[in-house]
């Protein structure tokens, strides 16, 4: 499993940068529309995150991911993807979230019990948001793909799912810093 780089309470920017995007956030949980605006803003400011880009992954094939910010109300991550990198089915427990693809392409799948799973291509420049009831899996589709993710309230627990051939879905609770990987074949 790859080990995330976690930096508590501070964006990886120069302390002299008065325009850090977290300075003006409200002291409350953000809704999915506010999270979407946050990831859209961060995408336009690569000087705040591009020095964290890495596509080497871990020896065991894990993705590279870095916590850009975490406080009592919001949690922001940068993820670097290679083709085939896969989160497996998961939810974000009580958190709403937003994802912005800043380079490359991801595939988002949403489960459809008894039917064909919904697949959506999320390409560079695209973004989406979701509430705490959202279950999905993300897969890297292009070399050098990069995405920014924001969650509120901050992630503490997530649910990972397996779906058996007979359609049974099971949930396993995992910690926010655990790397998500498939529990079953795609």
Image (cartoon, rainbow, N blue to C red):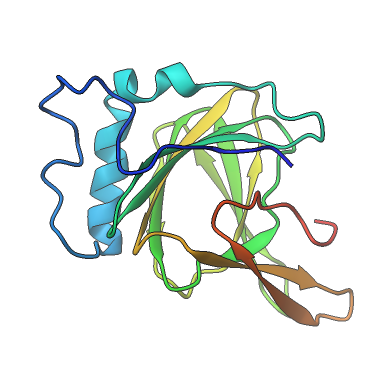
Q: Quadrant of the N terminus?
A: top right
Q: Quadrant of residue 160?
A: bottom right
In the image shown, does 142 or 172 lie closer to the viewer?
172
Q: Nearer the viewer, residue 107 or 15?
A: 15
Rendered view: 48 above or below 9: above
Count every numbered label the image shows and give the total. Answer: 0
Residue 127, horizontal then vertical, whole percent: 39, 45
For this view, does 19 lie left or right of residue 186? left
Q: Residue at x 85, y 57 (%)?
A: 185
Q: Position of residue 106 (x, y in %)?
A: 58, 40
**Left or right: 12 as drawn, with respect to 61:** left
Q: Residue at x 24, y 36 (%)?
A: 41
Q: Quadrant of the C terminus?
A: bottom right
Residue 11 visible in this rendered orientation of the protein: yes
Is 30 left, or right, of 26 in this rendering?
right
Residue 139 % position (x, y): 66, 44
């Amino acid at each position: 499993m790859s080990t995330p780089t976690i930096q508590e309470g501070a964006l990886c920017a120069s302390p002299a940068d008065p325009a850090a995007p977290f300075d003006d956030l409200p002291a409350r949980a953000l809704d999915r529309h506010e999270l979407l605006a946050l990831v859209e803003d961060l995408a336009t400011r690569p000087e705040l995150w591009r020095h964290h880009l890495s596509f080497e992954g871990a020896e065991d094939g894990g993705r590279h991911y870095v916590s850009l910010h975490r406080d009592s109300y919001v949690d922001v991550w940068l993820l670097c993807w290679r083709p085939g990198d896969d989160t497996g089915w998961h939810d974000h427990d009580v958190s709403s979230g937003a994802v912005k693809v800043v380079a490359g392409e991801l595939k988002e799948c949403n489960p459809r019990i008894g039917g064909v799973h919904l697949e959506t291509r999320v390409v560079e420049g695209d973004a989406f948001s979701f509430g705490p009831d959202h279950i999905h899996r993300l897969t890297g589709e292009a070399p050098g793909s990069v995405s920014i993710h924001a969650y509120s309230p901050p992630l503490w627990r997530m649910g990972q799912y397996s779906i058996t051939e007979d359609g049974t879905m099971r949930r396993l609770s995992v910690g926010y810093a655990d790397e998500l990987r498939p529990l079953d074949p795609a």
